[in-house]
Amino acid sequence: MSEKEKQLSFEEAMKQLEELVEKLETGEVPLEKAIQYYQEGMKLSKICSEKLGNVENQMQQILNEHGEFESFSIQEEE
């Protein structure tokens, strides 16, 4: 991953990914360009995934009332 890609915020990466998807969904993109867009999209997807993973790791530890770290996990509704 390049330094420029590392500096992208999650929101910037998602916006770029959404723009690529919109271009591909038109169906009017030449095959070579579609492959290039797909590869760029996969890189952006990886960036987003890594950033979300980092945030998830940070959220798993939250300060409790005594200033100590405690484990935190999000419970999904059934």
Image: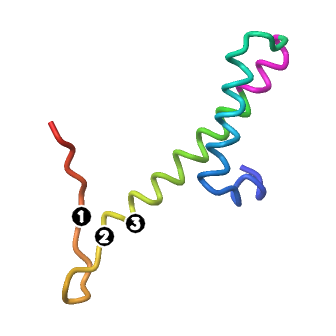
Identify the magenta region: 31-38
Coloration of the structure image? rainbow
- Residue 58 got which mark? 3
Q: Are marks 3 and 2 in contact (CB under 8 Å)?
A: yes
Residue 9: x %, y % from top left: 64, 57
User: Is 49 drawn above or below residue 34 in the view shown?
Assistant: below
Residue 70: x %, y % from top left: 22, 74
- The kind of residue on which mark 1 rests is Phe
- The kind of residue on which mark 2 rests is Gln
Report the residue at 71% width, 60% height from top: 7
Report the residue at 69% width, 25% height from top: 22
Q: Are marks 2 and 1 in contact (CB under 8 Å)?
A: yes
Secondary structure state at the residue bearing disc 3: helix
Quadrant housing residue 37: top right
Q: Which residue is mark 1?
A: 72
Q: Quarter of the image containing the C terminus?
A: top left
- Residue 61 got which mark? 2
- Residue 8 got which mark? none
Within 10 Å of disc 3 (Cα), the crowding (few <14, some 14-19, many 20+) is: few
- The kind of residue on which mark 3 rests is Gln
Quadrant housing residue 23: top right
Q: Is residue 44 left or right of residue 74?
A: right
